[in-house]
Each structure stands twice: as C-alpha cells, then as structure tokens.
Amino acid sequence: MGSSTPVHFFSHGSTMMLGEESASATYWKKCGDEALKNDVKHVIIMGAHWAALGDEIEVAANPNPAKSPVAYVHPSKYVDYKLNPDLPMADRCVHLLRASGLKAKKNTTFDWIHDTYLILIRMFPDGCPPTTIISMNARYDPHYHVKVGDALSSLRKESEKVLLIGTGGAVHNLYRNQWSQMLLYRDNFAMEHPPEAALMDFRQEFEDAMTKNSGPNLRRAITMLMKMPNYRDAHATDDHFMAACFVAGAAGRKEDEGSKAVLGAEDWELQNMCNSQYTIGSWGNGITVM
C-alpha cells in the first residue's frame, strides 16, 4: 500500500480533439507519460456517452470490444489502436460498487465510444493499458455519481497502481456551439466571436469549485454547480457533467483534504465549448514528465 494516485477530470470535447493538436492533447499525453513512469497497471474511466437505465450501473466486460466510428477524424488516427479491456478489474469494480449498495452488473457486449478511447489514444499512443469503463446512470443524479467515485476510491491506494479518470466536459452544450467552421472548413478551434458570457461565467464557477476545494468540500462544490442559474446554459443535458461528480467522489475523501487540483490545459472549441483539463493530487513518488 502506498500513497493515493491522482484523479483526472478531462473534457474530451468534439470528436476532432482526437485528430487535431491542442493544449489539451499535449496535456493528456503528459498525464499518460507520468502514469507510465509511475508504473500504472490499471485505468478506470467513466465517460459521458454510456448510461445504464433504471437504478443500475454497468461495468464494461466485453473481451473484444469494437470502437464506435469517429466523425471528422481520419481512420488512421484510431482504427488500428488496440483496446485492452481489464476483465479482472471489471469484476473487482462490480464487487466494490455492490458493497456500497449500488446495483452494479457487468455488460459483456458493450463497444467502446470515442469519449473514452479518444482520451486513451492521446494519453497512451504506444499502447492501451488494462482499462475498465464504468457507465453512468441515466437518472443523472449527481450524488449517485459521487457515490460511484467514492465506492472505487479505495483503488487509488492499491500496490498495483490504478488511475481513475472522468471524461466529460466543463462547458458542453451542443445546442450553443457554433458548428459552421467545423462543418465547412474542419476548423474546430475557429473563434469568430468570443464565447457567450453565461458560458464563460460557468467555466469560472467550475474552475473555482475544482481548485478552491478539497476533500468532502470538493464533493459539495461540484454537486452544487448543478443548482447554479447558468448551469443549464453550460450543460443542456447532464451527461457530460456526471464525470465531474464521479471524480469528486473518487478524490473527495476526508483523507484528500488539502490535495491540490491543477488546471493543466484548456481549449475553447466551436466558440462555446470549454475543454478544461484538471488533475487532483499527484503521484506519490514525485516522478514527473517535463
């Protein structure tokens, strides 16, 4: 047993974030390099595009998952990347989730979606580490997803190091995005106009919640964001916010008080989508990649 591994909240943005270079892509690669230098053995990731119905949560356990197609990205960027489902860890996750009172079960037919493997390709371009994907629950209760993160938080202290990641969006409202530059010119970073004020305000609220809180206060701050007046401007649907709640649960234990959160990179995309990348905590032995 050692010190806890860090937890990442990544905004995966549009599909073009897989194909285009950006500050976010550079940071994802840095985080992957640090994980490998620190001998990571397992990755557990909750995305934003898979939700279980009713009161259940599912854990991916397909031994040979396919990849859903990625729009506006050349197939060479992802088709040949070999996925690496971590079936023993899927069993462990189901056990931990059930022990916390959650109705968890394995899904042996789930195929992986770009919200998760986009991040994995960027972090680990030379090979995917053993990875387990956790679904959301389609009722999108923030406290439920905090509980999911909390149920798996003990894995951060495993001797075989486990990295927990949530991949959603800091500001992710597809109805407010300006798509014309991407559709016409394949330029997802074009900024003909500044982002709308309400979205910039929520982006700041999100940063404050992440960087000015730790431990249980982080959980309160993140879940409280859903009650902000401009939350619905920033998130027309709740799916891309649940990963932040998962991260708050995983990195918001009492023992995490004082753990620093860092805004490592950020890109505005499609005018109104803010792709912020956060890391909470650090690798215990201090091995970093410059």
Image: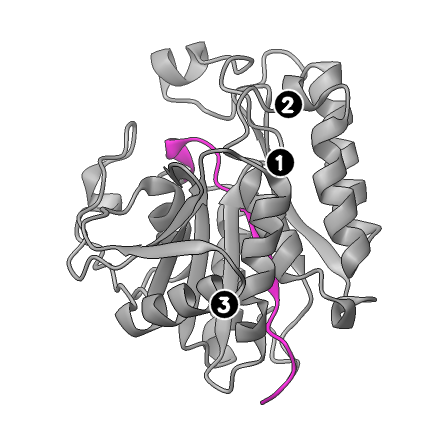
Residue at 15% across, 58% down: 64
Q: Which residues are magenta?
A: 1-17
Q: Residues within 10 Å of mark 3 (few under 14, many from 20)?
A: few
* CA distance for labels 2 and 3: 34 Å
Specify which label sits upstream in the sequence, 1 or 2: 1
Residue at 84% across, 50% down: 212
In the image, taking residue 194 as reference, residue 156 lies left or right, namely: left
Q: Residues within 10 Å of mark 1 (few under 14, many from 20)?
A: many
User: Which label number is shown at residue 170?
Assistant: 1
Amino acid type, residue under disc 3 in the picture: Ala
Specify which label sits upstream in the sequence, 1 or 3: 3
Amino acid type, residue under disc 2 in the picture: Ala
Specify which label sits upstream in the sequence, 2 or 3: 3
Q: Residues within 10 Å of mark 2 (few under 14, many from 20)?
A: many
Please report contact status of discs 1 and 2: CB closer than 8 Å, yes or no.
yes
Q: Residue 65: horizontal and vertical position, in percent?
A: 19, 53
Residue 12, magenta (yes or no): yes
Instruction: Find disc 2 in the rendering and name its residue.
Output: 234
